[in-house]
Amino acid sequence: MKFTLNLKNSYSYIYLTLSLIVSFWIISIFEIVARSSNAVSFFSTAVSLCYKLLNDFWTGSIIGLLFLPLYLGSVYIKEPVGEVVIKILFSLLILVQFSLVKYSLTTLINLGADILGYSMEDMYITVTASESLSFLYFVPYFMLPMLYLGINKVSVKYIGNRQIYIASAALLIIFGSIKLFTPEMSEALHQNKIYFFTKDIIRFENEKKVTNATNLFYQKEYPLVQPFKSSKDVLSPFFEIQEEKPNIVLIIVEGLGAEFIGNNALRGFTPFLDSLIPKSLYWENFVSNTGRTFGVIPSLLGSLPYGEKGFLEINPLPSHVSLISILKANGYTTSYFSGEESSFDRKINFLEYNKIDNVVDINKFGKGYVKTKENSGGFSWGYPDAEIFRKTLADVDEKKLPRLDIIMTLTNHEPFDFPSKNVYLKKVDRIVDSNKNLGVSADQIRMNKDIYSCLLYTDNSIKDFMEAYSKRPEYKNTIFIITGDHRLIPISQKDKLARFHVPLFIFSPMLKKAERFKSISSHWDITPSLVSFLMNNYTFDKIKKTTWMSQGLDTARQFRNIHQIPLMRSKGSVNDFIYKEYLYSDGEVFKIDENFELNEIDDESILQTITDSLRESKRLSAYLTKKNKIIPNALNVYTRPAFKFSKEELLTINKLTKGLILDDCFLVARQLAFNKEREKARLLCNYILNELPNYGDVRTLKARTLAWDGDYAKAETELLDVVKRTPYYEDSYVALMDVYWWSDQNSKAIAIAKLALKNEIKNPELRVKLAQAYKRMNAILKAEKIMDSIIKKYPKNKEYPKIKKSFKE
């Protein structure tokens, strides 16, 4: 009897499942309409819609089968419960599908295993950078569940039980037949977003099992170790070698794809960079190793393996060397300049591991620099490109030669905003109206007007920087290297290689001649070639062995590829591979021609060879990073060892932080400090700082606990580090004033207070402590004068007159 009842209820379940599928279809139609505004042809739009509807049907059907036992079990317990549970679960799945579609519309890629490589804070920053979180943003999240319930109610009312069975069977037969004869519908672009998300995470977890550290062994313990001479000096034939070591300026341009340069398809909006091509060494078929910014620093500066989710995500970092550490060991002043927070993507961890001298990020700009305005959600990435270059020029005056200056731009990224944007929007209009040689239509450009205006702005910012630098005395002995981190995402890509295709310029007054190269190289090749060039031509402490992932730039003028280049599209996803003149991507193989265009081929033997090579490259990357086998410790004399916790400390940390984000860990540490459990508080602080070295609140708390325990020297060191990292953060100055008071170092207290005031720290408590320091040094008149100014500004504060009166006691 109960079983018969469940059969009757199966009608309800079919209605619920088909309503889910229809809801998926509506979301897909929304996605297609949104994409069609990006100048996609009607035929392509129609085909894509058909494929998406088919894939939505199969995903919905699979979901229906997976949840059927839960439904039947719930009905068996109590009849109405099953329907309520499924309605809630399917409504949540619809919201997940819509969220994944929104992500795809912004990034032009599906979200998959890369979600495992980002913290909640990183994801929040990325989303708020691209979207304004207003009330309207959340309206669909209320409407879609109501839409699903409405579809279900209408279908139950107007479609009979028999018709629903017949319709379901017909759809299964028709859609099943179509799927058999249209393999292209399985492409990521057409897949249901929940299906892709789930499948990609399963793939990632399966690959983790295959590359488990316990299963990884190599006959050669350190496979990358090679004699120094294996990286040939291919650059010196192009340079006039000077006696002094050259300065290196490395400009990493956010979103600069090769499609925007020279005579390529999206040309016309980088006039200055275009003008550098005939004056530079220029690689036109150059690639980034990753499809997002997270990979450019370790690939370009260290020729390092990816690891599981990107090299920077490994904690602690494996032993390695980089361009930074090698040049610093040879007398270079090393600096990194960016307008964003350097802790994003854990860049600061890499930079500090390699003992970089100076890091200038969002925390160090100060007065006189214009920040990109916040969007309606209150988010700003930081300082725009012109300000980054202006800050660089201001700061390098104080740095001794020779220098390595790494500059990372920011503006050419969502939300594509910057000061004086209207000026550049008008420039886009003028270019469109006057230039008949553009590679795409005027309508396509106007649809992405914000992006093209950003390109013009960034290009002009580089031009202004280069012109200003050319007036400096060290210009004649400087090498400029300019490349993109990856091709920007929001403009549709012509093929699967476009995301990685970036330009590489090497420009210098020292060049004997300019040259263009059609040979393929990648970010992995820059540091090997640069180190080889410098060590073979200048007074350097020679390294006997190298540990690069690639052997250097190919300077062949004709098209060829001598490298094997795995490409990490997003964190956790290495499904693209350049092998000889072929690109492997998600199971498909394409032939690359000399114009860097792709043509799909069907060759099982090539597919097998490339698949085997890609599998081996993943295995090698896992072995190197999981077993810390990049470089033997005996060879690594350059870098700072990563901080390691003992087993006992890790047990304590895990117990105290289980389920907590880092901000919550800080609150726990603060409470421990207040409870006089200061060693535990410092342990938690060290744990947080190991992840976020720039976290000023945490380092200040650690310093205060040291001071409370009477260790004033260590407390001072920590607080001065905070001041160096974040010179406009007031709490560190106040804490330092206390440390100097308690340790009877009044002259230091006065000096640090003056620095705080110079940096426009306006906390009145700081000025009070300055007055008290003067009083302790018997400079009563100065102390009273400061207190008078404070009392005048804060006349309602009753404590300040008492403090002044105490000076006479």
Image (cartoon, helix red, strand yellow):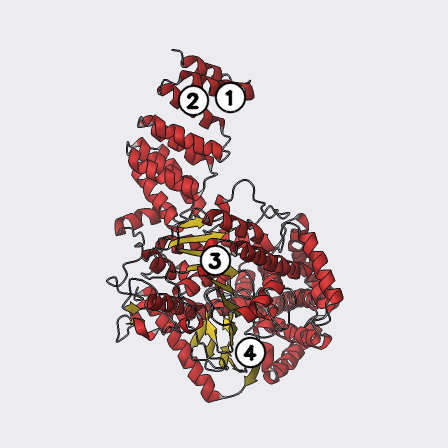
Mark 1 or mark 3: name the one nearer the start of the chain: 3
Relative to 181, does residue 80 appear above or below in the rendering? above
Going by the numbered disc 1, the residue's amino acid type is Ile
570 or 300, which lies in front? 300
Going by the numbered disc 3, the residue's amino acid type is Tyr
Contact flag, marks 1 and 2 (Cβ < 8 Å): yes
| Furthest residue toward left | 634
Relative to 734, does residue 460 appear above or below in the rendering? below
**Mark 2 residue element:** helix
* Residue 353, horizontal then vertical, whole percent: 35, 54
> Label 2 vs label 3: CA separation?
47 Å
> Label 1 vs label 4: CA separation?
67 Å
> Label 4 vs label 3: CA separation?
34 Å
The residue at which mark 3 appears reads as 475
Mark 2 crowd level (few <14, some 14–19, many ≥20, 10 Å Cα) = many
The residue at which mark 4 appears reads as 596
Mark 1 or mark 2: name the one nearer the start of the chain: 2
> Label 1 vs label 2: CA separation?
10 Å
Mark 3 crowd level (few <14, some 14–19, many ≥20, 10 Å Cα) = some
Is residue 109 visible to the viewer in this orientation of the structure? no
Question: Based on the displayed image, in which of its 4 quarters is residue 262 positioned?
Answer: bottom right
The residue at which mark 1 appears reads as 790
Mark 1 or mark 4: name the one nearer the start of the chain: 4
Going by the numbered disc 4, the residue's amino acid type is Phe
